[in-house]
Image: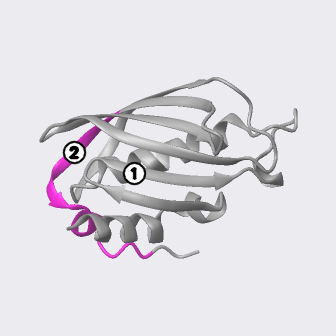
Amino acid sequence: MDVESVKKHIEKHDRLIEIFEMKIESVGDGEATVSMTVGPDHLNAAFICHGAAIFALADVAFALAGNSSGKMALALECAINYMRPARPGTNLVAYASAIHQGSRTGVYTVTVRDRQGKDVAFFKATAFRVDAQPLQEKCGTGQVKR
């Protein structure tokens, strides 16, 4: 499975991409860029972007980078540090890149920035490659009743 097929598979089947109105900007070998504009549904009670929305953005970028080889990779651990709030209307961009891509594990970092280049969050995650089957075969048809 090539990188473009991985992108299309995740874009089609990861529901948070649509729900959070994310845009996959690019996917390459061990890297991905995903963006999202902070809207009313992303806000917490303090009227800033909810940390879970920022985490979800970083996690989608991580998923794309981690699965870019076409082999199913699932998170073993994820951690995030928030550095500054994101206000309504802010366009956030998550830049994921591999530090290590082994046959069974991968380590990735994701930096979330606003379009002015200010750091909003830093995310680090470890992926486990489930087995040698390609992502699409492992997932089957992916048909889910909604």
Query: Residue 121's spot in the image, x, y percent?
Result: 58, 30
Residue at image coords 87%, 32% = 46
Q: Is residue 7 left or right of residue 79?
A: left
Residue at image coords 52%, 28% = 122
* Crowd rating for badge 2 (residues with CA inside 10 Å; few <14, some 14–19, many 20+): many
Residue extent of the magenta highlight: 126-143
Query: Residue 132's spot in the image, x, y percent?
Result: 12, 54
Q: Nearer the viewer, mark 2 or mark 1?
A: 1
Query: Residue 112's spot in the image, x, y percent?
Result: 56, 38
Q: Amino acid at mark 1?
A: Ala
Which secondary structure lies at badge 2? strand
Q: Is residue 47 above or below residue 77?
A: below
Q: Is residue 23 above or below residue 42?
A: below
Q: Quadrant of residue 134?
A: bottom left
* Crowd rating for badge 1 (residues with CA inside 10 Å; few <14, some 14–19, many 20+): many
Residue at image coords 79%, 51% = 89
Which of 94/72 is in front? 94
Q: Residue furthest front?
A: 116
| Disc 2: which residue | 129
Which of 37/18 is in front? 37
Q: Quadrant of residue 52?
A: top right
Q: Is residue 26 left or right of residue 30?
A: right
Res. 127 mark: none
| Disc 1: which residue | 32
Q: Amino acid at mark 2?
A: Arg
Q: CA distance from mark 2 to mark 1?
A: 18 Å
Which of 139/145 is in front? 139
